Image (cartoon, helix red, strand yellow):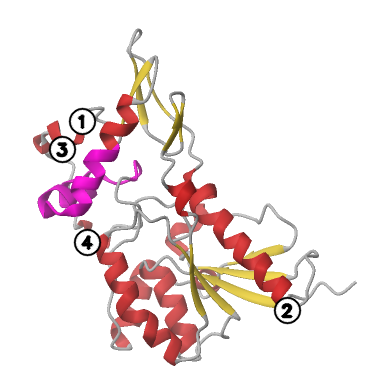
Amino acid sequence: MNTEPEITVLSIGWGVQSWTLAAMCALGEYPKPNLVLHADTTWEHAHTYEFAAEWTPWLEKYGMNLRTVSDSKAAKEIVTTRTRTHIPAFTLDDTTGSRGQLRRSCTHRWRIVPQRRAVRGELARRGLKTRPGIVRQLIGISMDEWTRIKTSDVKYIDLEFPLVEMRMTRKDCMAWLTAKGLPIPQKSSCVFCPYHSHYAWYQLRQAAGSDWKTACEVDEIVRNKRQGYTCYLTDKRKPLEKLTFEDYEGEFLFDMSEYPCDSGHCFL
């Protein structure tokens, strides 16, 4: 049985690594995929949307077939019931004071499901049926993110990690972009992701823009929709608007401008 892939798909989150891989494909330094997919959670930072709007035409000029997919209905369901939250919020038991963190389903619902729906649609458009290995999906994960490498949980998709194969780190990606005269994007993630570093929260608050406002609104939503314990977006377990960033004094011990992806979970 033929197990060679029929189509190649590249996932782009518009962060440093996935942008580097997409640019490599555009410039002919890596084979072009048949399709480039951006799974928009609808909760990205403003700078990510701005970067994507500016550089999507550049990718398309070089023959990259880019498509943005989203399940906006699912993305609005941050909290589906009074006992379920999709994001991995930090918890504080109202009775015992014990602490924990919720399991996340946001990545699967907001990123993976829309991409797989698009992939199956592309197969159908080409008159192809799913079979083991029919899709090769390229993920922009670098050497310093090796813990994010996973195997596919569906048989018709094989995951590959070209930057790891090229032994490139995030710094290598930044150096490559600079050498090509291409911009280095800011980190991509949902504005309210509980996996943000302390410094990322600090930066978001200092910017005091719409992203910070959205994060604070979501912080209130997850806290007020639970029973038995209280939820927060940071491990300090304080409301974002009341968080005193002196709490983090002494934690910013090195240059955070080159800190790896805050989440490390969303194939960005």
Q: Which residues are magenta?
A: 193-218
Q: Is residue 207 magenta?
A: yes
In the picture of the structure, the residue carrying the numbered disc 1 is 239
Q: Select label 3 or label 1 by which is in front.
A: 1
Q: From what the image shows, is residue 243 above or below residue 264? A: above
In the picture of the structure, the residue carrying the numbered disc 3 is 248
SS at circle 2: loop
Q: Is residue 268 left or right of residue 51?
A: right
SS at circle 3: helix
Question: In the rendered image, is residue 265 in sight?
Answer: no
> Could you say which quadrant of the image residue 7 lies in?
bottom right
In percent of width and height, residue 72 lies at 45, 53
Q: CA distance from mark 3 to mark 1?
A: 15 Å
Q: Between disc 4 and disc 2, whose residue precedes?
A: 2
- Between residues 129 and 263, which one lies in front from this camera angle? 129
In percent of width and height, residue 209 lies at 14, 54
